[in-house]
Amino acid sequence: MMTSTTGVTESGVREFPARSVGGGLALLLGLAGVAGGAGLIALGSVAGSSGAKGGLIAAGILLAVAAFIAMGGLNTVAPGEARVVQLFGRYRGTVRTDGLRWVNPLTSRRRLSTRVRNHETAVMKVNDAYGNPIELAAVVVWRVEDTARAVFEVDDFTEFVETQTEAAVRHIAIEYPYDAHEAGGLSLRGNAAEITEKLAVELSARVEAAGVQIIESRFTHLAYAPEIASAMLQRQQAGAIVAARTQIVEGAVGMVELALTRLAEQDIVDLDPERKAAMVSNLMVVLCGDRAAQPVVNTGTLYQ
């Protein structure tokens, strides 16, 4: 027996194919047995000897009853379904081949859907890695991969998947911040692809005991909680303004440097340090200002 990192115990029950045959031939044989039994009963009813009469009727009844019991092993398996077969409580395999199949009539067969399913969690309020309350919800696409584990390892595999999905979403939410304050850090909003991939990995580990395969998982709702949403919006706006201003200043410095270099290379005008500083100041005001600059025409000399 092994224990996974999520604390779910794994046992040795695994799916394997059940012994089954095509149901068409079994159905024909069963009907033939019923017809043969009815024929023996009819033949015995007209027999002259009492001994032959009783024997034929008894044989006909036994043949008809045996045929009816044998036909009880017929099962119709639809595409996307499976039948988990048990004999006296013991797992005897799974029938996945669709169509009419025949198995031991003494066994019990449980129908199980192997189709792809969706589960969307409710909107949950949790605290992220920075302690900020956030709201999030996720959708998980899954299906039963191992029918034996789904039936025998957990009480209700559907409820198990739903519970483990909510637990995984909460765990991912508290491991990462909504927005990363430091450069290069993972965040729920900024690194959706990486976070959903980690969510899928954790979900797969959590539901492995139930024989469930996680096909896809993604967040469907992600937002700050209403009580801090306005404050966080102001913070995001301030960060955007600072980033934009930083880019503008970097561009303006480059343009001023280029202007001074070109003036010096082409010997257009000779500026002393004082006038050069004034020119730099004027250019920075024009380039970094948030409104159009008003030009002032100097009708005097350069130093007046």
Image (spheres, helix red, strand yellow):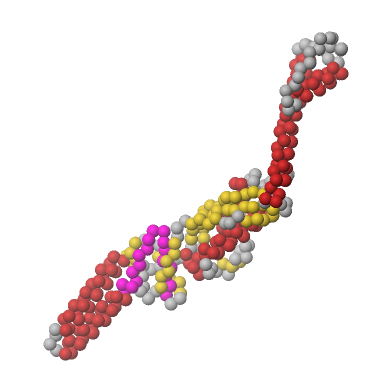
Q: Residue furthest bottom?
A: 50
Residue 76 spot, x, y in % from top left: 35, 65
Is residue 28 magenta-colored?
A: no
The image shows residue 154 at horizontal and vertical percentages of: 54, 68
In the picture, residue 233 is in which quadrant?
top right
Residue 105 position (above or below residue 182): below
Residue 124 found in image quarter: bottom right
Q: Give the percent coordinates (x, y) of residue 48.
A: 12, 87
Numbered range of the magenta stretch: 70-87
Q: Position of residue 208 (x, y in %)?
A: 55, 61
Q: Is residue 254 visible?
A: no
Q: Residue at x 18, y 77 (%)?
A: 39
The verdict on residue 78 being magenta is: yes
Residue occupying the point 77% across, 15% down: 263
Q: Give me the residue at 55% from left, 61% from top.
A: 161
- Residue 222 in view (yes/no): yes
Task: Name the residue located 31 percent from the left edge and 72 percent from the top edge.
Answer: 71
Between 161 and 28, which is closer to the camera in this rendering? Answer: 161
Q: Quadrant of the C terminus?
A: top right
